[in-house]
Image: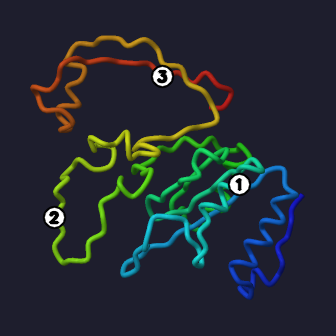
Amino acid sequence: ERVNPDPDCLQGNRSVEELVSEVTNITREADLVIMVFGQLATEGYDREHLGINLGGWDFDNHISLTAKEKPTVVLLQLPGAVLMPWRDDVAAIASVFHGGEQTGPAWASVLFGDVNPSAKLPIMIPKDERGTIPPWTGKVVNYREGLFTSYRSPFADVVTAFPFGHGLSYTNFEYGPPEGLPPAACAGAKSMGVLAPKQLVACVQVRVTNVGAVP
């Protein structure tokens, strides 16, 4: 059953505390909770932190408490990475980053199974701020870590919540046995600069097959 919010909510005449209290009461009557959060960042305006904070209200604890009572799905509309200390509490997490004016229909298509979510993360989602480059207020920033940030970091397994390229879908896949190929079959990797000529040790192929009911 669809629950319509108080009209004052849509008119911006309610405090964040009042809105959160109203939403909390509604979720107690629901079988499933879907939370949608958005964050903004633009030229001349950066986020002060990587948490989900709207109107001065910290929603991290609210998400965890809700997820312990009801199955909870969190949908995120983001300009970049956020911290998700509640990631193990919720039933599912999805992000479209900033999808534009068709974000609503896109969410509906995924939630109702009309579209199989198959995208992969273009960034790493950190466990905490140790997995990010610290902010700097000076005019010169020295990136001492070079390319060894995010998933390339030697500490990636410690600081990573979801690695670069992570992404699930509504189906299942099977991985076939690895097959050795002649080195010439991997020549493309060298030509694209992925590997230096002397780094090519072996060329291996693995067949991935969709064995689920969803294409």
The residue that disc 1 covers is 108
Query: Nearer the observer, disc 2 or disc 3?
Result: 2
Q: Position of residue 161 (x, y in %)?
A: 46, 45
Q: Which mark is residue 142?
A: 2
Which picture quadrant has residue 80? bottom left
Depth check, front residue: 95 or 207: 95
Query: What amino acid does circle 1 point to?
Result: Ala
The answer for how far apart the CA atoms under marks 2 and 1 are is 43 Å
Q: Is residue 172 above or below residue 20?
A: above
- The number of discs equals 3
Q: Is residue 55 above or below residue 200?
A: below
Q: Position of residue 204 (x, y in %)?
A: 31, 17
Tag 1 or tag 2, which sits nearer the N-term?
1
| Outermost residue to the bottom | 13
Quarter occupied by the N terminus: bottom right
Label 1 residue SS? helix
**In-image side of 169 versus 151 (left or right):** right
| Outermost residue to the left | 198
